[in-house]
Amino acid sequence: MRKYSSLRDKLFSDFLNEKLKGAKSYDRIAGYFSSSILDIAGEAIENMEGKVRIICNSDLDVNDVKTAKLASESMKREWCEFKPEELPPNSDRFRRLYDFLKSGKIEVRVLPKEKFGLEHGKAGVFTLADGSKTSFMGSVNESVNGWKINYELVWEDDSPETVEWVQQEFDMLWNSDYAVRLCDFVVEDIKRISKRAVIHVVDWQENKSEPSSVAVESEVTRQGFGLWEHQKYFIDKAFRDHKTYGGARYVLADEVGLGKTVQLAMAAELMALYGEKPILIIVPKTLLKQWQSELWDLLGIPSAVWNGRLWVDENGLEYPLSIDKCPRKFGIVSQGIINNGSQGCLDLKSQLLSRSYECVICDESHRARRRNLSANKLNRSPEMNNLYRFLKDISVRTHSMLLATATPVQLYKIEAFDLLNILSQANGSVLGDGSSLWRKPNDSILLGLDLITGEASIDDFADAWRWMANPLPPSDEDINIARIRSEADMSDESYRCRLMLSDFPKPVQNRIEELYYDGFFLKYNPYIRHIIRRERSYLENTINPETKQPYLPKIKVVLLGEGKNDSLVLTGYMKDAYEKAEAFCELLQKRVRSAGLFKTSLLCRIGSSMVAGFKTGSKMLNEWQYSVKESLEDSEDEVVADSDNIRDLTPEEYEILNEFVKDLSKVNISKDADPKFKRTLDILTKGLRLENGQMTKPWKDIGCIIFSQYYDTVEWIARNLSEDIDGEIGVYAGGSKSGVFCNGEWRSETRDNIKAMVKSRKLKILVGTDAASEGLNLQTLGSLINVDLPWNPTRLEQRKGRIQRIGQINEEVYVYNMRYKGSVEDRVHELLSGRMESIYKMFGQLPDVLEDVWVDVAVGDIEKAKQRINEIPQKHPFEVKYHDNVKAVDWESCSTVLDKSEIKKKLLQQW
């Protein structure tokens, strides 16, 4: 045995390099692997006859190694968190490492640290040039610090017994079922970093200004799940158009869960870096925080939110500046301000309209609607709501404009026109100029929509050319279009061909005719050009020719709890209480004709849980004279009453509300009383039987998010679950209400900590309000329980989108919907059951217009509810196949990157 100490010897030269010279192999058990070994051993490894095999630790979860996909994603995240791009530049070291890994000269396998903890055991075996073997053990890691800087001890032993023992240890680890090879992403990223060059923003602006230079080291690429091909394609398309004279004008209509926010945000970041003007983002009030957090968490983009009085940045710092003086390049404003007609809001809108913008984004843009939207008024000029009018006005103040909605059409085709009408205000390439038939008022607009759906046709070829010529599509859409443009001497920026059909030579007329009969109105119309919609099923079933894999991994959603016998029966005092809640709402309906949602709030809350109904009823009795938000503060939603006198109860109303509270007081609302808790506990601890007769695993083992609209329900369920299930139960809610229950005891936690605990799988059960349905990625959880069904259908989709999303680790996820038998939710479910599947196939979700169905049922107007459902068409009114092409875009290998400090400086600029 020979002993080495870094105090007495030079471990890297006296020991390591000497053993590697001409060696046939080197098998190494290491605490962790670092490319810095090549600073000292690279030349010796090159001169080895054989290879180096290193088994080392990783932050892999033991569950990650079950599939190559999960293992690869986990290694990618760990590698990126190491931030190799921030190491001192050493292109030779990285090039050499890449060559070794690519050639197989070095092989690396990693093991889950929690399973093995190799940092406490380091050893190796050398097979020397003459075929003899020696082994060593000690404290040294496979790194520069280990071999050259730290105080380390090494014991070498070449006895056959010791060598064989160390080799057996290595072989058991190397061949372990938990050992996985270094993933391809890490190997290729090493190659990229070996060529990495940092450029200034001004150089990027003046040259090709490729999106990849910004995207390749963004937070979403390095710390998230990366960007999928359909996302990169839209970002690239929007940015290329932004650099043209007309700018980018698109409706992004991807289905829920396909990452619209990150596409819009990165496109806007590129625009902000390319130009000098600000970015304005207009979103529903409930999405303000989601947008700000996703900008920061996914892309590292600082932003400020207007809270009604001042700006608040990504760190929560307040800036007492006017609305037109945002302290960040990105400013986020609530649609509530735009919708409000008060003088104060009119002044704010006027200030916003006084500025010019690089890009304006509007999320949930289908809310920009005409008021006269009914079957018999579609040929009339739109009576624009405030959001529609504002977007139309600001359209002329921005170079690019991106509208986002999963449902560009909810009922009528004209809704698609309204969105393109907004985009077309400053860009004639969208619908043509003022003389275009596509935008001529009334019947001409409807004819255009019928043409693209195939419900109408034009027999006269000369008339058809008038539609085709204004706007004439870009040259890159078809070779015939390119030749028509060339013959008409049209520039790339031109969109209207002013030549009549007879002005063209006969061969070109033939090309126009060929284009027309080849399906011009189906393939090249303005709608298909400016509405970009990719459906999940399309991406999951379309093969990427380069990878031979689908563009998006398939995530199957198994929907449970939908059968007639799945509704939960209320008995005794709970049944009586629900009936009294209905009677109370019916009394309000007779007295107050407005404030529909507010009148039915008690039914909404008791439909969530008995405890939420009890607390709400008690507050109504005791605190009705206070403001709406004070008396119903348990709700995560904003509730607005249209009529102040609704809070002045009549004697009859007071009496029935009092009886309601008394009934629930008798029950004491224990966890054994409400059937929703028992069903939740059973699902978590036992699983559910599927249609094929098989049982799922207990959902607590799969990982489960449990949703409710109301914090009272969330707190009640989480606390009681913690008494019946071992481990911690997470709570995710608005304000400071997030935390963890364990054995019934509460511990407050920040929402960021809750996210981190879910991501690391320390929390397998999370109970949340709808705050958890916005901006929270729950890819480690494979199931979802809706304790209540929100009356706003979009909320239900947002909830599902937390687990059915890019990066989900499971190929199949479960969703269970709960409802009380005979409740409003149960009756709406019954009304919709015959149409649910067809509506989902058409829209990908339930359209917002169905929200009023819940209110109709709650106030007893079943006929009105049926009428609203019947108004939904049996066939999608805009069934154009507007899938945009999805093409492979390679950003991951980009080695030319923008200076991060310059990016930050530019995005921190004040308007």
Image: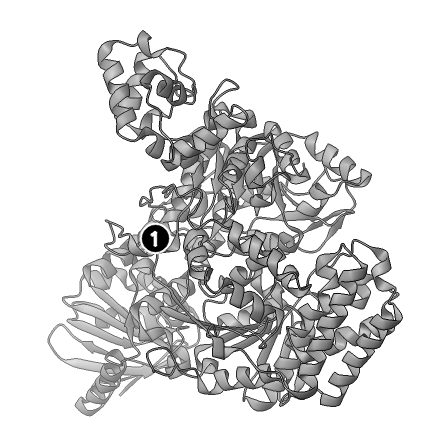
Give coordinates of residue 220: x percent, y percent.
47, 54
- Res. 124 image quadrant: bottom left
In the image shown, does 792 or 326 lie closer to the viewer?
792
User: From where the camera sits, is residue 211 visible?
Assistant: no
Q: Is residue 156 left or right of residue 774?
A: left
Q: Residue furthest bottom?
A: 161
Q: Is residue 629 left or right of residue 409?
A: right
Give coordinates of residue 496: x percent, y percent.
43, 18
Give coordinates of residue 273: x percent, y percent.
53, 37
Amino acid identity at mark 1 = Leu
Q: Quadrant of the N terminus?
A: bottom left
In the image shown, does 789 or 902 lie closer to the viewer?
789
The residue carrying mark 1 is 539
The image shows residue 752, relative to residue 431, as above or below, that is below
Q: Quadrant of the C terminus?
A: top right
Q: Is residue 310 left or right of residue 442?
A: right
Q: Please give the name of the residue rendered at 57% of the width and 44% of the height, measured from the top-left corner.
A: 365
Q: Please give the name of the residue rendered at 54% of the width and 82% of the height, measured from the top-left corner.
A: 680
In the image shown, does 447 or 630 lie closer to the viewer?
447
- Res. 369 image quadrant: top right
